[in-house]
Image (spheres, coloured by chain):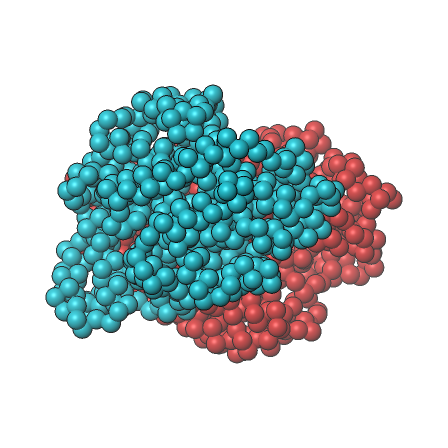
Chain colours: A red, B cyan
Amino acid sequence: MTSTTTHTKDLTPIEQLEKLDQSLSALGFSEALIFWDSATLAPKNAVNGRSETLVHLSEFYYNTLVNEHIHQVLIDLEATKNDLNDLEKSKLQFFREEYDKVACVPVDEYAAFKGLQALSSDAWEEAKEKNDFSIFEPYLQKVIDFQRKYIEYRNKGGHPYDTLLQDYERDLTVEITDQFFDRLRAVIVPLVQKIKDSGVTVLSPFEGVSYDVKNQKQLSDLLLEKLGFNKDSGIIAESVHPFTMNITKDDVRITTHYYEDNILSSLYSTIHECGHALYEQDIDVALGFSRLATGTTMGIHESQSRIYENNVGRSRVFWETYFPLLKNLFPDQLGDATPEICYKACNYVRPTLIRIEADELTYALHIMIRYELEKQIFEGKLNAKDLPSAWNELYQNYLGITPDSDAKGVLQDVHWSEGLFGYFPSYALGSAYAAQFEVAMNKDFDVNKAITDDQLILIKNWLADKIHKYGSTKTPEEILLIATGEPFNPKYFTDYLLKKYSDLYNLG
Amino acid sequence: MTSTTTHTKDLTPIEQLEKLDQSLSALGFSEALIFWDSATLAPKNAVNGRSETLVHLSEFYYNTLVNEHIHQVLIDLEATKNDLNDLEKSKLQFFREEYDKVACVPVDEYAAFKGLQALSSDAWEEAKEKNDFSIFEPYLQKVIDFQRKYIEYRNKGGHPYDTLLQDYERDLTVEITDQFFDRLRAVIVPLVQKIKDSGVTVLSPFEGVSYDVKNQKQLSDLLLEKLGFNKDSGIIAESVHPFTMNITKDDVRITTHYYEDNILSSLYSTIHECGHALYEQDIDVALGFSRLATGTTMGIHESQSRIYENNVGRSRVFWETYFPLLKNLFPDQLGDATPEICYKACNYVRPTLIRIEADELTYALHIMIRYELEKQIFEGKLNAKDLPSAWNELYQNYLGITPDSDAKGVLQDVHWSEGLFGYFPSYALGSAYAAQFEVAMNKDFDVNKAITDDQLILIKNWLADKIHKYGSTKTPEEILLIATGEPFNPKYFTDYLLKKYSDLYNLG
């Protein structure tokens, strides 16, 4: 349960690496709890002490990781790498990468960026609320400037944006992402057009009808139970934007948001975040209190939320199986509905302005827009001030619609305010990984039958065994090989989309 | 809002002290949030990562404070003390004391104790729940052993228990405390006997009647508003044992506990914790993000909760003024009651087993029992295994009753499990300070009239100006002089008790 601390000088190099891991994990625990708290509970004025605290914690983090002593420990271990076991090797690689990533930035700039993030998030929130991009613009420009400097510090060669992409998905490049998105676009754009041409409209039992929040909460709880969420190792709360915060594998917190006029929002947020949570909760306990006891990359993480949200939750069998449960909670609202109507309603394809409310098919287009903008920012072609108009232009190009306000446009996502450039593509990658995982899973057991039998736990068990348990000790490539027997292949995703939407809209 | 970090070598000694203050404040912020979270929200299994984290944070704390560099900074500043302004002098004194307190303990023992605290609290909780002292005993003995060792490390001379007392109330000694308690005992014991002899019983409208929790919550909110609690700089939540957690002066969190069958519990918990919270919220903003931006000692802190709970909240005018508010929320339950009945009911004197449910008069006896036990522990006369029977014996001596279970006896308080020996006497001191403050306040304005006029805010303003704003920059002695014009005088408290209870029970 508790570690005993020892004087550093008495430790072997591998013990020193373990101690580094634990110290950084303690700081990570604190930071995670602070973020959770700020998004769910903290009073308004708490921001002052919070931004101070985050600056100083990041300084502790920097100074604990980046110093001559740790530098030497890494060199010593790399020289005797063959003596290490697999977990030790993974740790060595993890902290070597972390060291190189952090050490290239001067400590004062590193810590100051933490302060900037807190202030920038605040400014973004206010700007969004007031629909006034100018409030956010100066902060955003500073965040961009820092990231540009960071790319120079890292000096990895290649496309400057590669450095940022690789912070979220190991080994990802602009070249790979361009090819991936070209391939998606070639399938999705004509498919959306055909659906539009089909003239099919969907009468949704979820629109224009009020679903009381108390019963929505009960539904969330029921779903979490069926999905296998461990309530002794996690909690669910509410926040404006749903998210998952993994404090440790034994303390994984998710949020959802209940709208009376949009039950699908809380339903799919709960399922999505639960997918993230199961990944964390099922990490092998042998990894211990470690920076590696968390999901390996954002792309793989997102595959776990999306396989539950889309492949499971937006499937026909899901609605056939769980419609009675919903009808029981909402007999008046769903009196005339059928599972098939619900299935169609939750997969209704329409160009929309808000990413997180988009259907599964057009969702990837929202990601491509952000990817294009980020690429141009780090090619030096766009600055903060250019983003609102560039945003609107791309929405017109990709989706044929233009936001009537920045709040519904360039200000909709929190990511840029926190400097999370390079993050968005992992959402689309996650969907593609999920499709590949589903095909592999079906070779081991009939996934649709598991859903029909109300045995969602079989899905969790498979994912735990093939993916979750490894935490960060495997790369995405390794995970894909272990779980599916082959490297990443986006064709599984495009096939999945073509099959699902051709069937849904009778495109023949 | 956010600090910029600078290379330590470029800083002047006073700037280095400021930086130390901020770094330790960031760790304090994290630790406070972790404790808050663990008592209100965290899932069961979170304890694993939490105890690890607390160990490592305490190691950061230790290493940041205790090193050659800081040692030299303190010496340099002490040599040029006359050049410092008042706030800087206070900081120097504060960190010199903190340095001496921490530096005497080896770092590994210091950090290991943090881990022990988390495990010991867990064991205590289980022991209390199962009414099985043996679960807690080995942990308690370890905690006692650590404290005994700590006293040796500190090596301050005098009574060994003095060292612990002074962790909570600067300059307190066994000699002073003995005198104080002798004086209290001489008044309270005969007074309790007279009340018993009077044969007066009180028909309480608060016993055997159910008060619904929803309306109790509304009452809490109304009271917080009237007391002046700033909801932008604090929140209220629920926990098993009510407490206040000051994360910063802008983020002060209190808890209460609602029992359907005991409305007085939530009512007085809310008022009590709000008293603590107002102290923190009203600290001068000029103190900034600092370890000194908190109440000066536990005794003074407790005076602020108790002046609200007892001097204000258990007064006749309080009930005369706010009875209609309660009756409006609970018309059925309070239909036959009057303000005078409520006043008598909330001051009903009876020997009881549980400290936190005791009336104001017998409360001090509960404290004296704990004080006696702690004194004997650190005189080497008692160990963990001896405490249940010693506890029961003292309850028989002081209150004429014996607990029928350890859960209602020696296991009732959390303090010992966390190593908070020396803390209890500050509760009684707080009541005595409160009486002295009330007399002084009445020289400036009529406190009863302020309550009658529903102007509780006048009380808050007075306390803020005389006590709160100074944070930890003044000693209790200085605070008493500023606020009351004289040193601590327990006669104010005994006079207050004699007057109040003679009147209540017509003791003539």
| Residue at screen point 30% across, 57% down | B487
Residue A56 falls in which quadrant of the image? bottom left
Give the residue at the far front of this rendering: B508
Q: Position of residue B50 (x, y in %)?
A: 40, 41
- Whether residue A165 can be seen here: no
Q: Could you tell whether A369 is left or right of B434 in the image?
A: right
Front residue of B64 and A425: B64
Q: Position of residue B419 (x, y in %)?
A: 32, 37
| Residue at screen point 63% across, 35% down | B203
| Residue at screen point 34% across, 56% down | B296
Q: Quadrant of the N terminus of chain A?
A: top left
Q: Could you tell whether A390 is left or right of A342 in the image?
A: left
Q: Position of residue A279 (x, y in %)?
A: 51, 40
Front residue of B500 and A111: B500
Q: Could you tell whether A17 is left or right of A26 in the image?
A: left
Give the residue at the far right of this rendering: A336
Residue B54 falls in which quadrant of the image? top left
Front residue of A268 and B236: B236
